[in-house]
Image (cartoon, coloured by chain):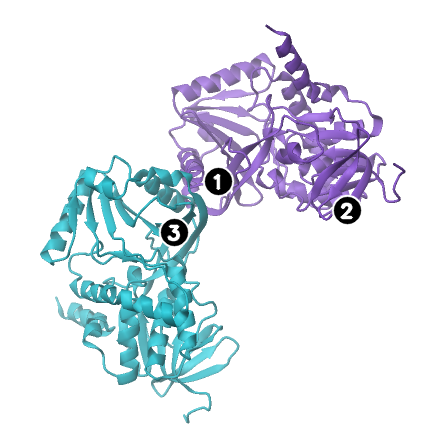
Chain colours: A purple, B cyan
Amino acid sequence: MGAAVDRTDVVVAGGGLIGLSVAWRAAQRGLSVTVVDESPGAGASQAAAGMLAPVTEAAYGETDLLRLCLTSLQRYPDFAAEVEAAGGRPVGLRTVGTLVVGFDEDDMRELDALHGYQRELGLAAERLTPRETRRREPSLTPRVRGGLAVDGDHSVDGRALHAGLLAAAEATGVEVLRARVRELQVTDGRATGVVLDGGRELPAGQVVLALGAHSGGLPGVPPLPVRPVKGQILRLAGAEGLLEGTVRALVRGRHVYLVPYAGDGLIIGATTEDRGFDATVTAGGVHDLLHDAIEVVPGVTELELVETLARWRPGTADNAPLLGSSGLPGLVLATGHHRNGVLLTPVTGDVVAEHLATGEVPELAAPFTVDRFVRADRLERTSP
Amino acid sequence: MGAAVDRTDVVVAGGGLIGLSVAWRAAQRGLSVTVVDESPGAGASQAAAGMLAPVTEAAYGETDLLRLCLTSLQRYPDFAAEVEAAGGRPVGLRTVGTLVVGFDEDDMRELDALHGYQRELGLAAERLTPRETRRREPSLTPRVRGGLAVDGDHSVDGRALHAGLLAAAEATGVEVLRARVRELQVTDGRATGVVLDGGRELPAGQVVLALGAHSGGLPGVPPLPVRPVKGQILRLAGAEGLLEGTVRALVRGRHVYLVPYAGDGLIIGATTEDRGFDATVTAGGVHDLLHDAIEVVPGVTELELVETLARWRPGTADNAPLLGSSGLPGLVLATGHHRNGVLLTPVTGDVVAEHLATGEVPELAAPFTVDRFVRADRLERTSP
């Protein structure tokens, strides 16, 4: 196939935080980039709480992922400043720190286990008495049994960041096309572009798949281990001065988090549900979030409930993203970020743009190529 | 003042259920009628659960109000049929009956007291065992301690009724003006019309005040004992087959009701708050409604939360409406319906239209003129 006149170096399918970050970084490297999205930022980016909290989320056995998350967190201040400069608007980076609190003995055991793991890894975290916990966040209920302070875990306003990234990308020459991608174009075993709803073809040297939970469903894309993990989230107003930073709580075994943003906003999240592409905001989901949040910070009762919404995280079997080569030449992956999409936005832009420009997989991204699942499959098949 | 060319017999300020019912009935009596409302039906009518339940709401010492409510309930089937015929659309009258249930000993004592009062007044109500209660509504939690079945208490779809009444009124010649009433026009001690936002005057022989909770705040109107009583309400979907009829519950002293409507709708209501004209949907209000509703019918958990809203009931000191003469010649009252606006829509239309046409206060409405409060004031002043 000869190069079409309007062929672009890179087409990015998906204009959420991940797609825009990749597109922006690729354009900065001199590539011509088109992002295609019917409604940029209306997916998981829309419902993100914006926690940048790898240390309070550290989980056993996910050290590669933790390293990637910590690298991305480290890059956040410069990344945010650069987006703000290029996009011309604030992105709401909040560096106050994060508090994890618990209510019963099981909760506190889980907190202590987390703290032990953090120390094992040399991560900075401080175990607090109930009194110390409430000194940091006086709005917490007196029934809190103790806390864990992680000053390095921050947050960002996900919607503001998306708006900033969109402006920054466009200012750097990225074309953003409001259209739906209907299928991946594959010619002679190579991805050569995308076809839009209505039939228009968009030829490209390389295609980046950044469709979040929908990444596996695009016709033409080889089978991908990405599934939708539903999350319901609440946005409230009137919370000025209620919390200093993010509060994550274990309420008798159930997880809830409260993330202040903008002047008086508060995000309460989130459910984690395996229900396919069900977008229903349920009575039970909203009830549980409100119930647990009010239990943690009784003052939440008085806040205005502004918005309830449900979206899907792109989940993978090991909770880690899919970055780089897809196995199909010309198709590059930037998906599967599960609960870490906002946090991993800077590093994903960096490593995927590097891969697009050089063809190499940066060392940092090496553990996150899709063939780790193929390898695991093969190992399983050879075992008795 | 000479009669203006476009002077109408009656101007009704307020196009909610009450205003439209009065306007429609007055037009049927041959009067020329204009209804003025910026957004007809966007007030309390919008948030009504549509319960027609005077027997399950019977309260000691409110026998005049009960009589008015029972009369209106009796008129509902004909009224609904007439609205449907004139308006050309269904209004969702549901005649399945209402169940009241309780959870703890105090709840059951309150239920028994209500039942005793109902029997004293000769009202039809049947006390049920827990098993009988759940046979009527199998979705109820097994933890219900007993119930009270009132087959005569029904419900109507408030929004459908409003749409039907609007169409019926217009079909009968009522002019509905989308505008905001700025003030009552008073000339030589007599109401002579209204002034709209922007200054347009609307002269009228008589003015009906049907502004709900806002009735007391219209410049030119004499002081009225009407205050806003905030109610928050939830609308859910997916409830097809969940409940047969209305379920009212006392959940350890807290009241909640669940009213099925349309094909798969369910309304959960309502808070009762003295907060002035505060329209905030609060985290606490939504939580309490969901919590109690899920406690009564666990299947509510799975339903879709479609809408949350807050409006103001026009409250009075004795929970009864203000009907007929206002004390100011030319100004007629149709307000103060508090929690009974939907139920009292038919009878209010009848008695206020009769008053407009004949100048007489119908016997049924006599206990509800505003001078009962003046009389009570005087009595208080003469006591030591």
Q: Are marks 1 and 2 in contact (CB under 8 Å)?
A: no
Q: Nearer the viewer, mark 3 or mark 2?
A: 2
Crowd band around label 3 with a 10 angstrom C-alpha radius: few (<14), some (14–19), many (20+)? many
In which quarter of the view is residue A315 placed?
Answer: top right
Determine which residue is flagged by label 1: A242
Residue B302: x and y in percent read 41, 39
Residue B2: x and y in percent read 41, 94
The structure residue drawn at horizontal position 73% and vertical position 19%, both measured from the top left corner, is A366
Q: From this viewpoint, which residue is outermost toward the bottom?
A: B2
In which quarter of the view is residue B379 placed?
Answer: bottom left
Query: Dot 3 lies on which element?
Result: strand
Crowd band around label 2 with a 10 angstrom C-alpha radius: few (<14), some (14–19), many (20+)? few
Q: Say which amino acid is labelled 1.
A: Leu
Instruction: Give me the disc on residue B226.
Output: none
| Side (left or right) of A371 relative to B121 | right
Q: CA distance from mark 1 to mark 3?
A: 26 Å
Q: From this viewpoint, which residue is outermost toward the top?
A: A384
Give the vertical position of A235 relative to B261 (above or below). above
Determine which residue is flagged by label 2: A200
Closer-to-camera residue (A160/B109): B109
Q: CA distance from mark 3 to mark 2?
A: 47 Å
On-image quarter of the C terminus of chain B: bottom left
Disc with the residue nearer the chain's start (1 vs 2): 2
Q: Say which amino acid is labelled 3.
A: Ile
Determine which residue is flagged by label 3: B233
Residue A111: x and y in percent read 48, 20
Q: Nearer the viewer, mark 1 or mark 2?
A: 2
Closer-to-camera residue (B345/B42): B345
Query: Dot 2 lies on which element?
Result: loop
The structure residue drawn at horizontal position 69% and vertical position 24%, both measured from the top left corner, is A71
- Check the residue under mark 1 and report the chain it is in: A
